[in-house]
Image (cartoon, grey):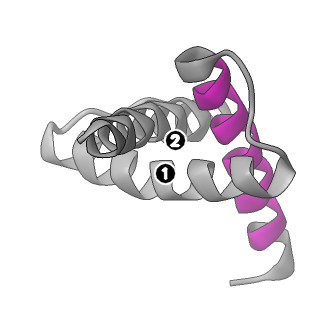
Amino acid sequence: MEVEQIVIALVIGGVAGWLAGFLFKGGGFGLVGNIIVGLLGALLGGWLFGLLDISIGGEWVGPIVTSTVGAVILLFMISLIKKK
């Protein structure tokens, strides 16, 4: 990976993590937390959308939507585990 790709991944992860935190609990998790949640959400969302054969276009919007959906699902699964 080049430096530019890493920076783009971190920005998309940060935005997706913040959006997921905002949608799920009403706020973000701080810069590092947002990036971690967003990057893990990108992995989960990419895997899930691949299974469902869903493709969202766009250079920025598609990855942000995919990452955000994955991050919301990740936060939901974590909340189910924490309740038990």
Horizontal side of residue 43 vs 19, given as left or right: left
Q: In what quadrant of the picture does the N terminus appear? A: bottom right
Judging from the image, what secondary structure is the residue with disc 1 in? helix
Q: In what quadrant of the picture does the C terminus appear? A: top left
Q: Main secondary structure of the magenta part?
A: helix
Nearer to us in this view, 83 or 35: 83
- Please tell me which residue is depicted at 30% across the width and 40% down the height of the picture: 77
The amino acid type found where label 1 is placed reads Ala
> Label 2, on which residue?
67
> Label 1, on which residue?
42
Q: Position of residue 10 (x, y in %)?
A: 76, 59
Q: In this rendering, is residue 39 above or below 38?
A: below
- Please tell me which residue is depicted at 53% across the width and 33% down the height of the picture: 68
The range drawn in magenta is 6-22
The amino acid type found where label 2 is placed reads Ser
| Residue 14 shows in the view | yes
Horizontal side of residue 83 vs 71, given as left or right: left
Mark 2 to mark 1 CA distance (whole Å): 4 Å
Nearer to us in this view, 11 or 30: 30
Q: Position of residue 5 (x, y in %)?
A: 75, 69
